[in-house]
Amino acid sequence: MFNRLFDDPPPALRDMTAGVRGQSDVPPDQAATIIAAAHNRPVKYSPGDWPHFDQGFAKYEGLVGSARPHLFPRCARRMERAWQHRLLVNGLVAPTWAIDSATAAALGWAISWLSPAQVLAPATGFFTPAFGLAAWLARIPLRPLSTHPQTWSERVARWLLDDLCLSAKLWGRMAAFMSTRRYYLLYGEAVSPMALAIRRAEESC
């Protein structure tokens, strides 16, 4: 689809993250507020329908939800359901006249971390876990046996917040590139959470 829609390829994640190592744009006090707010967010999906997604996962999914309005304050209002459905059935392709670059970045980010179904599907009462987050969690380093589980959980939460912020920046760059080329292609893999986790694991070695 990238080849069909764009004459030149969009920026690669490797190029966009070059030189970004161990940096956090979130001050400690603001990070603590966002992470604390995650504990109060209810889980939408039914744990009985998804038995492999435990309370630990639910806490991290809450963090995705609590970070979202901080990262995209201009895009807090949900779009019309008919437009969301149209974007879903059109293969996540939207013409640039239909939405602005900031909205496209917010949508791409949400699709990356949650899933097209969570972000765009009509309300049916059936909810899925955040599959992009699941891919991220599957690729972060394993907890060292010498690290207490609570300490590790706090470390992972901060890693996650930093990568949520980084991916928001990268989606901003991706959307800016697409905004001059007639179409937005909002595939979550364009700024892959799994790739960010692999990069983090490599840096931790």
Image: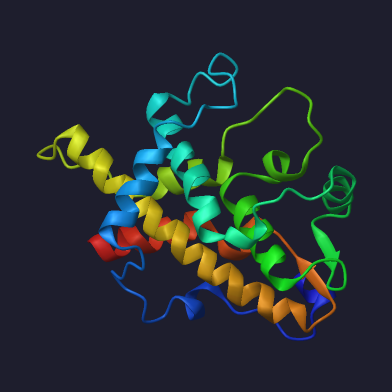
Q: x%, y% of residue 189?
A: 62, 59
- Asked where in the image residue 9 lies, by quadrant, the reply is bottom right
Q: Where is 52 relative to 162, above or below?
A: above
Q: Residue 135: image x %, image y %?
A: 50, 45
Q: Residue at x 33, y 46 (%)?
A: 157
Q: Is residue 1 visible?
A: no
Q: Is residue 203 above or below residue 136?
A: below
Please state which of residues 71 and 8 is positioned toward the viewer in this rendering.
71
Q: Nearer the viewer, residue 5 or 96?
A: 96
Above or below, 185 relative to 114: below
Colour scheme in the image? rainbow
Left or right side of 70 for 37: left
**Left or right relative to 92: residue 106:** left
Total labels: the figure holds 0
Q: Which image quadrant: the C terminus?
A: bottom left
In the image: residue 67, left or right of residue 50: left
Identify the residue shown where x is 22% and y is 41%: 152
In the rendered image, the vertical position of residue 63 relative to residue 44, given as above or below: below
In this view, the residue farthest toward the left is 146
* Coordinates of residue 99 in the picture (x, y in percent): 80, 66
Residue beneath the point at 13% across and 40% down: 147
* Residue 83 pos. (x, y %): 87, 51
Is residue 7 in view from this perspective? yes
The residue at 65%/65% (across/down) is 105
Q: Quadrant of the N terminus?
A: bottom right
